[in-house]
Image (tube, rainbow, N blue to C red):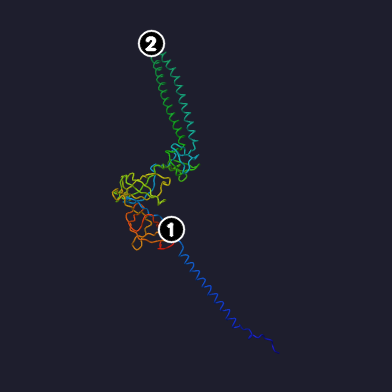
């Protein structure tokens, strides 16, 4: 019997079709690789041509000789008139009437404290005062009666009817009552003083501004205990609010004692706040504190602003440049070019700047001169009015595309 088995030899792949399919697969792989390379190239070109954000400033032309910085220092804006207002007694805050930034006048109420105990002490002192006054009235009545008795005893003594002892007793009674009245009057004055103290305690429950200014902090809340001295750990406040007279703002810097000879009272100063680095504020030295700090080897210098501005706030960081007096000779007609110091870059030991022209950088070597505060004088290579980069990433190149911000 013959079995019906399948003919496995008939299962073959057509060589023509196999060659055609394999070619299409290789073509797809090649096309995909080419597209990837093209995409990478396009991306690289796009990244290379992308504009880099930079900050720019214009070079300034100034006529005449300029004051030169002989010394630079840093410090802080500080007020000459500043006070943390505290209560004179220990009590609980009943009402807060001040907020940060509020303008206050001298004598304005900042807070009220709980005066319940003080009111009761005042009532008790007034009662003692009335008792002392009533005692004087009683003693005056007794004195009048004693004086009448003394008069009768003197008449009887002249007539020889009474003994000398009776007269002496009458005189003693009068003198005693007069002394007691004097004592009672002193007790009245003492009671009046006690009443005044109690009234002052009530007045001390009202905290007032010592001078006109601006409240820069609110240091207590309703319900908290306040005290003129530190007591009770962290549960007792020692201040109500800090008041600053903004009209008294000045600069305080520490100058190394090795350079203090370069500073004198009235000297011109150019100040720059850390918060506004492009803003140059004219000022002058108000005083040089006549003592040195042996630990830091510095001398404290106080500088006054020529004019105050609302942007100037207490405790701001500030950099100052102490200037020489500008020359007023024939060179006053010379035009000088000033540039922010941040625009100068070092490349191969040379000073260079990057100009911005039509959205692209132009590298240019310059020759710099003296520094004037945050500016530096450009002696050659740059003209006034040209736009330069003052802040940008490291590695800027000539011809690179940029955008200003």
Q: Earlier in the sequence, mark 1 or mark 2?
A: 1
Circle 1 Cα neighbour tier, 10 Å, few/some/many (<14 / 14–19 / ≥20): some
Q: Which mark is residue 158?
A: 2
Residue 235 in percent (x, y) is at 47, 45
Quadrant of the rendering where the C terminus is positioned:
bottom left
Q: Can you tell which mark lies on residue 400?
A: none
> Which one is closest to the eye, mark 1 or mark 2?
1
Q: How many marks?
A: 2
Q: What x and y, as percent, mark residue 176?
A: 40, 21
Badge 2 crowding class, 10 Å Cα cut-off, few under 14, some 14 to 19, many 20 or more, is few
Tell which residue pokes out farthest to the right in this image. Answer: 1
> Residue 32: where, in percent of width, then height?
53, 72
Frontmost residue, 252 versus 274: 274
**396 horizontally vs 9: left or right:** left
Residue 113: percent from left, percent from top:
48, 38
Q: CA distance from mark 1 to mark 2?
A: 121 Å
Q: Are marks 1 and 2 in contact (CB under 8 Å)?
A: no
Quarter of image, res 386: bottom left
**Secondary structure beneath disc 2?**
helix
Query: Which image quadrant for residue 196?
Result: top left
Q: Would you place residue 36 above or below residue 104 in this image?
A: below
Picture quarter with the N terminus: bottom right
Residue at mark 1: 54
The answer to which of 249 and 308 lies nearer the viewer is: 308
Q: Secondary structure at mark 1?
A: strand
* Position above or below: 243 against 366: above
- Left or right for 287, reference 207: left
């Amino acid at each position: 019997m013959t079995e019906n088995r399948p003919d496995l030899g008939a299962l073959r792949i057509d060589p023509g079709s196999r060659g055609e399919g394999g070619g299409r697969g290789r073509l797809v792989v090649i096309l995909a690789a080419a597209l990837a390379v093209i995409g990478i190239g396009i991306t690289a070109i796009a990244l290379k041509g992308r504009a880099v954000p930079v900050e720019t400033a214009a070079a300034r032309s100034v006529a005449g000789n300029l004051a030169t910085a002989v010394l630079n220092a840093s410090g802080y804006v500080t007020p000459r008139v500043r006070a943390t207002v505290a209560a004179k007694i220990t009590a609980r805050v009943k009402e807060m009437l001040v907020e940060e930034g509020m303008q206050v006048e001298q004598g304005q109420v900042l807070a009220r404290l709980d005066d319940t105990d003080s009111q009761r002490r005042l009532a008790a002192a007034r009662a003692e005062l009335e008792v002392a006054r009533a005692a004087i009235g009683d003693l005056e009545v007794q004195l009048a009666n004693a004086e009448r008795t003394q008069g009768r005893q003197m008449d009887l003594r002249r007539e020889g009817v009474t003994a000398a002892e009776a007269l002496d007793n009458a005189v003693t009674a009068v003198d005693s009552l007069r002394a007691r009245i004097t004592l009672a009057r002193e007790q009245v004055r003492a009671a009046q003083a006690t009443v005044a103290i109690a009234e002052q305690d009530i007045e001390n429950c009202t905290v007032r501004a010592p001078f006109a200014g601006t409240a820069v902090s609110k240091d207590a809340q309703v319900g908290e205990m306040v005290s003129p001295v530190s007591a009770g750990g962290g549960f007792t406040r020692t201040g109500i609010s800090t008041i600053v007279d903004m009209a008294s703002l000045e600069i305080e810097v520490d100058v190394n004692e090795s350079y203090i000879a370069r500073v004198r009272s009235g000297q011109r100063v150019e100040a720059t706040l850390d918060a506004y680095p492009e803003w140059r504020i004219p000022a002058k030295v108000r005083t040089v504190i006549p003592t040195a700090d042996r630990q830091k080897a510095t001398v404290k210098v106080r500088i006054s602003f020529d004019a105050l501005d609302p942007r100037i706030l207490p405790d701001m960081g500030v950099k100052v440049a102490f200037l020489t007096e500008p020359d007023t000779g024939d060179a006053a007609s010379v035009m000088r070019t000033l540039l922010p110091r941040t625009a100068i870059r070092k490349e191969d030991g040379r000073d260079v700047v990057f100009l911005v022209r039509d959205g692209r950088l132009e590298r240019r070597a310059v020759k710099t001169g003296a520094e004037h505060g945050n500016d530096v004088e450009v002696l050659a290579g740059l003209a006034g009015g040209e736009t330069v980069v003052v802040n940008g990433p490291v590695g800027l190149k000539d011809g690179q595309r940029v955008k200003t911000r």
